């Protein structure tokens, strides 16, 4: 408890402490020749996809340097996790990537399960795959639509959001929440599928590829959209690897790397699916890879729904799960392929009921770090399109 | 007495543009909602028509914010400099056989000149806002509007050559139905250049909301913002009316009141087409915009002028 300080009234008021705790902003080091303008994009700006501030040094409209300033959404989730029990951390992970909460849930739960040696029933693994592939679709809709909106095609945005809405409705009937699901829990999932959910899911999966092909014609076939995105923000494969890019950002550059196939986890090896890979590494390829991934996700969901029939309903939680988990001292790391790339969670246990340390390896953070590299030399109009194509979610970048 | 008449006509023009803008906002909401699988306004009045009535007081009563660092007198009056030329340009549009509100002998030049004065207002508002995003928007607007002036004027020049007159009512009297196929390319150039001239999508770079928040009017609020919007819709209405008249024949298709109805329907079709384009296409980039103007539209307009000139020699 903090005691109120008694300040003598006869003295002058104490000087206010320096509360300016904003991160030290590194201004562009190189002052270029000629007249340049410094423009602040954000932190509150329509196309920063969250709360990001980008300090842009402009020569006319050409970007000389773009410096992303992050931390506006830092909530200290990794630190907060140290004061909560293992089950209480799950809702915190919802708030990491709030566009794809299921992924953070799952990555965290996998780390806990590895730490505590929990075996998850297969039905729960199938359900996890289904919801996470649905989440991939929902999350990619949030990347493709805004790619249209960033270039001015707001109708494409509405079309993709319609598809996202259908997924979110499915999640709502599954766990009651539309954004932060708290659905994947250590040892299984929180609820079994409600009656009729499988049919609704099949309906969605049946119509989704056609809707995506419509977007492909409507947006990716549009001459202006192609002119705005082809050859813009080019990231070559070597840079993608050396900067730690993953997910569609790396695959758009031709890096054929997907944890679902290359470091298989859960029941993914049982499914037949392909990994779309781009070649040019520009905004167009990065965004289009997401579109084809959404279609591939539909294939995985269909197969998983078929496979689900083998298992008895209700077997969704590991047997003998204690109310309070207290894994033996040690550490564990596990990663999954989220919509943004490889999302990893590192947990250290000291044998108590709370994690000693949690660290999240955020793909959005690594991908956003590429912004200065890929935006230099393009125009201000391109900058927002490039930022959108990196698909950062600042809940996960700042944590 | 002349002064009083002028005042009345001016008021009528402002009311015409303001009313048209309010209806235009409602219509655009409906059109965009239809394109985007939405409903649009529908709760207030039948098909949401009373939404127009609700919008105006909302804008009137909003706080009028003037930024501290702004150049205040210029900031306050720049919206008028955007709106006034557009309201004035309506004056020379030939609505009726032998009648335009202002039947000037140089009406065609008057029409082409006045909307381009609006760029001055845009530059003033951009500079006075003391905001980098607004300034970039203003610079873009200036470059864009001055450039697109060229193909637009050349396209209209083809009709002027055919009619042999600069007086809009005389142009309309001389109009023949076969001018429509003859000047069709010119009409397309005029239509596209007009979209750029009124800063609408896919040429809405000066106010690109994903890049510049709202471009040159980022810092405006309340009624001053509404004046910008009225200017934008006014430019849409004015350009559509003028295009429907001189390129598509306007009232000449049918005699009497039916002719006026045809004219207004043609203009309405053009307005809807502009909205359709805006809600379908992404936005161009500045360099692509300029390249398009100088390498596609301008040569096409010059070809159209030559064709019109050759045909006019035969006549």
Image (tube, coloured by chain):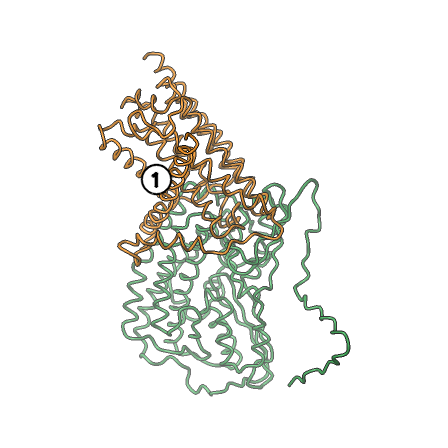
Chain colours: A green, B orange
When asked about the image quadrant of residue A184, the answer is bottom left
Residue A129 is situated, as x and y percent measured from the top left of the image, at: 40, 69
Q: What element carries label 1?
A: helix
Residue toward you, B238 or A233 = B238
When asked about the image quadrant of residue B43, the answer is bottom left
| The N terminus of chain A sits in image quarter | bottom right
Residue toward you, A29 or B132 = B132
Q: How crowded is mark 1: few (under 14 residues within 10 Å), some or many (20 or more)?
A: many
Residue sitting at the far right: A11
Residue A236 is situated, as x and y percent measured from the top left of the image, at: 56, 49
Is residue B164 found left or right of B222 in the rendered image? left
Residue A40 is situated, as x and y percent measured from the top left of the image, at: 60, 52
Is A50 above or below relative to A34?
Answer: below
Residue A98 is situated, as x and y percent measured from the top left of the image, at: 48, 66
Q: Residue at x 51, y 78 (%)?
A: A89
Is B197 above or below relative to A70?
Answer: above
Residue toward you, A132 or A166 = A166
């Amino acid at each position: 408890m903090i005691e109120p300080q008694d300040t003598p009234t006869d003295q002058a008021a104490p000087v206010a402490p320096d509360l300016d705790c904003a991160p030290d902003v590194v201004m562009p080091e190189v002052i270029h020749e000629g007249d340049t303008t410094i423009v602040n994009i954000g932190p509150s700006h329509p196309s920063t996809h969250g709360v990001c501030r980008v300090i842009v040094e402009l020569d006319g409209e050409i970007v000389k340097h773009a410096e992303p300033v992050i931390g506006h959404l830092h909530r200290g989730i990794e630190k907060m996790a140290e004061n909560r029990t293992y089950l209480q951390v799950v809702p915190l992970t919802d708030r990491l990537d709030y566009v794809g909460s299921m992924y953070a849930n799952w990555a965290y739960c996998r780390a806990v399960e590895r730490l505590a040696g929990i075996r998850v029933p297969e039905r729960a693994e199938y359900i996890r795959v289904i919801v996470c592939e649905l989440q991939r679709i929902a999350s990619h809709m949030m990347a493709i639509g805004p790619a249209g909106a960033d270039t001015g095609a707001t109708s494409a945005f509405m079309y993709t959001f319609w598809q996202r809405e259908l997924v979110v409705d499915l999640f709502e009937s599954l766990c009651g929440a539309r954004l932060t699901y708290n659905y994947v829990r250590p040892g299984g999932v929180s609820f079994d599928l409600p009656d009729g959910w499988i049919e609704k899911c099949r309906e969605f999966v049946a119509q989704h590829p056609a809707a995506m092909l419509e977007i492909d014609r409507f947006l990716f076939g549009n001459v202006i959209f192609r002119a705005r995105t082809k050859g813009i923000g080019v990231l070559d494969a070597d840079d993608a690897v050396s900067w730690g890019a993953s997910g569609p950002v790396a695959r758009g550059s031709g890096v054929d790397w997907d944890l679902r196939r290359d470091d298989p986890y859960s029941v993914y090896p049982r499914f037949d699916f392909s990994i779309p890979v781009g070649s040019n590494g520009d905004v167009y390829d990065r965004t289009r890879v997401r579109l084809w991934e959404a279609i591939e996700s539909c294939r995985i969901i269909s197969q998983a729904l078929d496979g689900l029939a083998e298992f008895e309903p209700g077997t969704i939680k590991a047997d003998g799960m204690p109310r309070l988990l207290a894994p033996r001292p040690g550490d564990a790391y596990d990663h999954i392929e989220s919509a943004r790339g490889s999302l990893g969670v590192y947990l250290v246990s000291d044998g108590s009921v709370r994690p000693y340390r949690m660290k999240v390896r955020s793909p959005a953070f690594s991908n956003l770090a590429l912004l200065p590299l890929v935006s230099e030399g393009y125009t201000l109009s391109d900058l927002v399109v490039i930022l959108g194509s990196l698909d950062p979610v600042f809940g996960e970048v700042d944590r | 007495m002349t002064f009083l008449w002028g005042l009345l006509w001016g008021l009528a023009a402002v009311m015409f543009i303001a009313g048209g803008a309010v209806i235009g906002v409602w219509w655009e909401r409906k059109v965009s909602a239809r394109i985007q699988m939405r409903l649009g306004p529908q709760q207030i009045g039948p098909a949401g028509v009373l939404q127009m009535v609700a919008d105006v007081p909302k804008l009137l009563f909003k706080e009028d914010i003037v930024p501290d660092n702004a150049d205040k007198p210029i900031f306050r009056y720049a919206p008028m400099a955007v709106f006034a030329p557009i309201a004035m340009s309506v004056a020379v549009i030939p609505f009726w056989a032998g009648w335009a509100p202002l039947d000037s002998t140089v009406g065609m030049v008057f029409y082409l000149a006045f909307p381009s004065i609006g760029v001055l207002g845009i530059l003033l508002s951009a500079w006075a806002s003391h905001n980098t995003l607004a300034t970039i928007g203003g610079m873009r607007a200036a470059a864009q509007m001055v450039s697109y002036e060229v193909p637009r004027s050349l396209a209209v020049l083809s009709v002027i050559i055919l009619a042999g007159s600069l007086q809009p009512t005389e142009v309309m009297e001389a109009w023949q139905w076969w001018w429509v196929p003859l000047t069709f390319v010119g009409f397309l150039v005029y239509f596209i250049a007009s979209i750029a001239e009124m800063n609408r999508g896919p040429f809405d770079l000066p106010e690109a909301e994903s890049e510049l928040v709202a471009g040159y009017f980022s810092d405006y609020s309340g009624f001053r913002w509404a004046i910008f919007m009225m200017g934008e819709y006014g430019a849409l209405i004015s350009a559509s009316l003028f295009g429907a008249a001189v390129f598509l024949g306007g009232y000449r298709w049918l005699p009497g009141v039916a002719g006026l109805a045809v004219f207004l329907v043609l203009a309405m079709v053009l307005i809807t087409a502009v909205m359709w384009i805006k809600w379908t296409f992404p936005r161009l980039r500045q360099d692509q915009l300029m390249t398009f103007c100088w390498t596609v539209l301008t040569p096409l307009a010059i070809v159209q002028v030559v064709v019109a000139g050759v045909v006019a020699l035969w006549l």
